[in-house]
Image: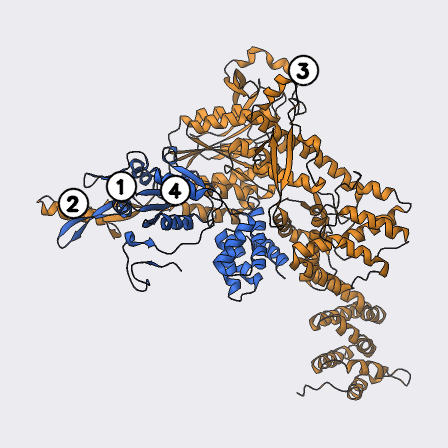
Amino acid sequence: MSQRPLSSFELEQCLENCLDAVLSTRRTAEAPASELSAFTRRQQEFVLHWLDVIVSSNSEMGFQFVSHVPEALRLLPVPEVEKWIIHFMDVYDREGLYPGSAAVRGVGLFAQECRIESMAVDFSSIVRVLEHFIRGLSGRGLKLEAGEHVFTDTGHIYLPARLAVFVSEKMNFRLYKATAAHLWAQTQFGTFRSTRNGTGLMKVCAGFPQRTRACRLLNALETVRLNACIERELPGLYLEMMALQRELAPIEYPPQWQPSLHRLRKPAATVQDTVDELRRLFSCRQTPPAAFCFQGDLRLEDTETAMRGRQQQEKRAFRLWLRQIALDLKAVEAARETGSAVRFAASWERAPDPQQEMSLVLQFDGTPIDPPDDMQLLSRSILQDFGEIPHDYLMPAGDAAYPGTSRPADLPSNVWEGSYHEEGAHLYNEWDFRRQHYRKDWCVLREIDVHPSDEPYVDEVLRRYSGLISELRKTFEMLRGEDRIARKQSNGDDVDLDAVVEAYADMHAGMEMSERLFTKRRNLERSMAVVFMVDMSGSTKGWINDAERQALVMLCEALELLGDRYAVYGFSGITRKRCELYRVKRFDESYGEAVKRRISGIRPQDYTRMGVIIRHLTDMLEKIEARTKLLITLSDGKPDDYDGYRGEYGVEDTRQALIEAKYRGIHPFCITIDKEAHEYLPRMFGAVNYVVIDEVNKLPMKVADIYRKLTT
Amino acid sequence: MQKLIPGTTLDGRTLKTEEFIVRDEPYYEPQGAEIELFHAAYTNQIPVLLKGPTGCGKTRFMEHMAWRLRRPLITVSCHDDLTASDLVGRYLLMEGETRWVNGPLARAVQIGGICYLDEIVEARKDTTVVIHPLADDRRVLPMEKTGELLKAPAEFCLAISYNPGYQSVLKDLKHSTRQRFVAIEFDYPPADLETTIVVRESGLAEDIAARLVKFGGMTRNLKGSGLDEGASTRLLVHAAKLMVSKVSPRTACRGAVSEALTDDPDMRAAINELSSSLFA
């Protein structure tokens, strides 16, 4: 077959042959023929083939087809054109000529739908990648969420739920990335930092007569500055972002904008320059040029509200760190004696290399102090907001820094203070960090059985996750099968050199030669005992409770296989007089029907007083004989109880209990889903003895995995 | 390349471990006072514990110190079947009779070399006990099978390394072991120093190396949020070497860093996006 495209004359001949019945002197095949002549021979053959097919049903449909197929070929790739043909012929078959021809004419709409269908990218498919990406950029995690408006409130980045701007999945993904990066740049390069006279952008905009226009202009100017920042810091990303924009329509700036562009692109430009330029351009009655495709909105009210909340939290956290440092330095007592306030000084040390992160240098009385890593991170976040550490942040937190530390002395719950409840219960000390002493027999703990539930929950989980469980079993089986080499065996797969030498020497000395001359691979005996301590506090209600129960099912399945000795306890309670430990599975119990029913009966209860529970389980573990003893906590947040057991008090008591456990040869470990766990878990469990799981629904899979990693 | 004594090349030659003397200065950029610290510990005959994540220069540091002190360096990479007799020595049959053959540790003690036990926690727990008498002021190596005690000369030095980042409870260093050592902590060097190292090790242009180091920092930001470890200096040097061999930066980062760091597809994609943000 010749590859030369058919000329418009040749095509007209072919079309006339097919469409003879519906053509007239006023309705010729000339126009479609000349349009079709611009396509390749292959495309032309495709059209002629289908024309033949269509005309065999209806000639008028054939004419409609050739009139619109050039448009279709321009809009869609050939396989999609075929789908369009099938689609309108379906309509014709079902509903007749008029709806059929309408469907032919609707090729533009069809193409659009098609494009959206095939090339759209969903937020859910990119969120994980982009969240890692954003965290990688600066180390500060921003939560990504799908939302109606595209903006950032400096804690979250809101992105559209679905993007179908480009006709390629890759480009749509890049647009997501570019949008997220642009909004990240707003937080990173100080868009929301206070301007010269301490006002935020919201006040600046409110000062203009046409607020909306001012806000749009501000966004456009700020984008110029941020683009320049991105170009300097992330050149590859910048090129990608510009390529995206070029694909749609390049942004042109009016001549009056030139000085602004020049000023805002300087490396030293800040949001203050943007505000100055906004004033200048606003008075020249300038309207902003079209927005960049990745630009997003500036929703200053929302941002301001969210920022204020976050800043307050950060301020408190920062001051608590200072307090900790001051306590360590024994500066608080000294200050109390002299009646003066403890004051720190902060400065920033910039490495000679401008690409490097700045680091915080704290000074107390002129002595530099090395701030802990978590505090460094926190201070970087504060730096992003303010460009410095504000003065009032540098005061260590006072004694009443935790809201609600005051003891509720006369609450109705104190009915439990009476001693008759202590009969038959276990009494435990509690650590008071302020006194640096234990409170004797402070907590009253009782072991209770979980009320078994009759729902077939465990079986359901087993059925639903059967694939996962069998995979889990496989990995654990491998674990069980881990080999160790046993020496001096009477048979085996390798010669034991030491044994041979010894035997040889024995033989020469006239002694009997040993037969044990081989090495053999033998399964390592696991001598492991583990207690799982499951948070049953009220905050686990719903999802988390479900995930915890699923995780327990998976764990039990895996542990049964390994043969490790294990026990499962839930814990909760309200006030020190009513600490409750719920038995789910004791060490000496087998994983049977009763245990399964208890797992499904785990329900959220009250509060989390962790110290006493850890002390009780430590006692229990100590009586078990095993080489390695583990205490694994599944939790969703900080220790917290009704009667002041929260904040630093709770953390310090829990920490003390964990130190006691470690001292007694038990390895504590914590698995949590609390995203803020990085703030307190390192203090409680130590830097490597905990894991934060970012999504609740991953808990069941992760827990078994973590257990495996932990014990090999 | 480092040249080793004796002979000019290593091709097809077998060397006894104690002949491993580092002759040319191994490149090492100090991050702090670790050289002085090691020196002082060496002169006072105190053993040294190197802590730090993988690929941050612990082994290179040991080579460098061996070169500075002009002592042979005997490195033992510990694994979970390493026994005490693998370190101390054993009887072997030679010409019809048994003869005692020293293990690497015993040889290092004999010749007054530096014995470096890499990743000590990987070895069996009983192994660590063997080094205890060597690691305190007795400085002797008891050889159970021969009934002898090997007294270490002043030149002998024991160094061990371990990575505190492992989360396995079975791979923790016992206090009775760790409290015999002077500990030196290693971490990834600050960005400018790391850039110098990458440039020096690979010959990559400085501006690209700086970007590569920035990329390394980005992956370290992800530690704890889905990544067990960020890219080590060693990985960055690998990527840089690939780039010098005309591999495009993105491909080099993918091969040397993201694929090496994780198998999680989302995480890998995110790391690749990070590298393409820096390299056009």
Task: Look at the numbered discs 2 and 3 and tell me whether their residues touch, using CB distance below 8 Å.
Answer: no
Residue at (81%, 83%) from the top-left corner?
A: A34
Task: Look at the numbered discs 4 and 1 and tell me whether their residues touch, using CB distance below 8 Å.
Answer: no
Residue that carries the numbered disc 4 in the rendered image: B39
In the visual, does A301 lie left or right of A617?
A: right
Chain-order first, disc 2 or disc 3: 3
Residue that carries the numbered disc 1 in the rendered image: B153
**Chain that is coloured orange in the picture:** A
Q: What is the distance, in whole Å, between disc 4 and disc 1 at their CAs?
A: 16 Å
On residue A298, which mark appears?
A: none
In the visual, does A354 lie left or right of A627?
A: right
Residue that carries the numbered disc 3 in the rendered image: A412
Q: Report in which chain the residue with disc 1 lies.
A: B
Q: What is the distance, in whole Å, between disc 2 and disc 3 at their CAs?
A: 78 Å
Residue that carries the numbered disc 2 in the rendered image: A514
Q: Secondary structure at mark 2?
A: loop
Amino acid under disc 3: Pro
Amino acid under disc 2: Ser
| Residue under disc 3 on the same chain as residue under disc 4 | no
Q: Quadrant of the C terminus of chain A?
A: top left
Q: Report in which chain the residue with disc 4 lies.
A: B
